Amino acid sequence: MTRNHDVIVLGAGPAGTAAALEAARHGLRTLLIDEGQDAGGQVYRPPCRALKDRPRTPELDAGDSLRRELSQSRVETRFGQRVWLVERGFRLASLGPEGPEQHSADSLIVATGAQERYLPVPGWTLPGVIGLAAATILLKAQGLLPGHRTVVAGSGPLLFLVAATIVKSGGEVPAVICLNRRIDWWIAMREMVSSFSLLSQGAAWLALLLRHQVPILWGHAVKRVEGGEAVSTVVVTPLAGGSETRLACDALCLGFGLTPSTEVTRLLGAEHTFDPQRGGMAVATDSNQATSIPRLYACGDGSGVLGAASASLTGRLAGLSAAHDAGMNVDREARAVSIRRRLVSVSGLGQAMTALMTPPAAVIDLMTPDTIVCRCEGLTGADLDSAIASGSRTMNDLKSTTRCGMGPCGGRVCGEFASMLIAARTGKPRATIDSPTARPPLRPVSLGAIGGHFDYDDLPNLQPGPL
Amino acid sequence: IAGIERGTLVRFSFESVEIEAYAGESVATALLAAGIRSWRNAPRDGGPRGLLCAMGSCQECVVRIDDIIVEACRAEVRSGLAVRRVS
């Protein structure tokens, strides 16, 4: 099934949906494609079909309003599509409930969002240990608590959102283990003063935790996770060193911020830059959200983690640019100026939150020789250190020597930490550790599924050549 | 989470065990709610693995449905679904 559109938008979160709506508004035949069942991405993910009533939250309202606007627009949507190949020109191959599909367009807007930053500690592979963003998905989209007694640990604002939501939903939180020190939060507050709603929401979370007597351990880290078939104890210490505290629990939410998902833009060969203020390695974009590849645009957290408010604005800029560059009659500069002004006013907050999420260099020492770093391949800290000591100086070196990053997750879980490890051991700046070369498929797909259905008779009958 | 109105209860099978769950929730949610926290073992050390990312990225929660490997966190529960371990 091949179709033609003027622009394809990959990812239907707040950025992608805004981009698609903007592009369609200016006359482009627009296709919005996403792996989920509906628009919303992760931050505005709708509750699953099984949940009949959910309390109204600002996020749910924002997501519903976005989905409503989309349904009333001329944007064509394809949901449930797992995109496994993207090529310049641009051509996408995906696998959906109706089988394999291909789509092509002259312009492509990538809005694939962000993913969790994982930092391994001994025992973190035990069942019951999930990410912080993962916890938000379980809580709001599946109506599921991570466990009965859930320790919440890591860095950034998600920590308090998750802990407060668990408590509000009837779960128990033995403690919140916050890598950030109190002073890190005071510094971030400077950017928050202009956002009263966010400040009051944060205060509400803290008040709730205080009321339920949930201890918050500032400047602390998870040192070890213990258990047999699943997590039973979490051992924490001050990051600066000090005595251990043991916490009995049956679940641990562990997350250290978000980092842009760059698989698609790397596969297309666009230039990327490392910027801690944007969550790490991200595709390089100009003020029009254009990348180094003509007619390829990026927006939302995928082009720099700035949060949902910034995402819809960068999305609109991308849609606007795609329309303008495609020759549509649109006064780009006039429209872009007002969007950029709003972006400036909200992105300061986004950057402050991203800065809070960024882990300090000392986290590298939480990894021990027997800690599993590459979960897919079962590689330990010792395995990777040995490879680095023998001469692996880049992610490509590490990948081809140890298979780190070649498992089913494609390096999504281990890549960030492995890069940090190479930088720490070789003394090279983190910014110089490039991501490994991206190869299709973007996600594991079965040959049978992407091959489609054909009979023996469909195979061409080749004549043998002359001897 | 208690106190939420949910849809239809259906039955599906995981290996030889019959499990009751709500149509439309993820297979991962149904397994976790049934007290099953691990349905895969790690390469090399064979240790138990469970759900990690809940968004279809990490591949830790994979199961086999209709002989195809899919993430349990993305697969939806429906009546009569036959879910197996990957190995």
Image: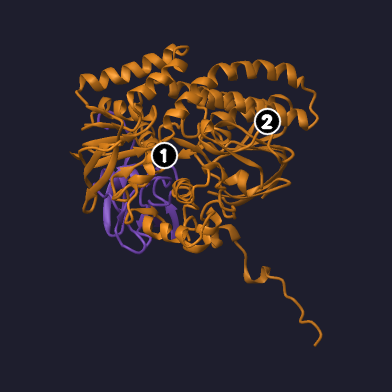
Chain colours: A orange, B purple
Most distant residue in the front direction: A427
Query: Can residue A206 be seen by looking at this rendering?
Result: yes
Q: CA distance from mark 1 to mark 2?
A: 29 Å
Looking at the picture, tell me which residue is in the foreground, A207 or A47. Answer: A207
First in residue order: circle 1 vs circle 2: 2
Pointer 2 chain: A
Pointer 1 chain: A
The label on residue A286 is 2
Looking at the picture, tell me which residue is in the foreground, A252 or A366. Answer: A366
Residue A434 x %, y %: 57, 48
Could you tell whether A296 is left or right of A411 in the image? right
- Residue drawn at 51 percent across, 60 percent down: A391
From this view, report whether residue A281 is shown above or below residue A178.
Answer: below
Mark 1 or 2, closer to the camera:
1
The local crowd at label 2, few if under 14, some if 14 to 19, many if 20 or more residues have their Cα within 10 Å, is few
User: Which secondary structure, mark 2?
Assistant: loop
Most distant residue in the bottom direction: A467
Residue topped by disc 1: A361
The quadrant of the picture occupied by the C terminus of chain A is bottom right
> For residue A288, which quarter of the picture?
top right
From this view, report whether residue A256 is shown above or below residue A398.
Answer: above
- Residue drawn at 68 percent across, 70 percent down: A459
Query: Can residue A377 be seen by looking at this rendering?
Result: no
Residue A306 x %, y %: 52, 27
Residue B3 x %, y %: 26, 28
> For residue A362, which quarter of the picture?
top left
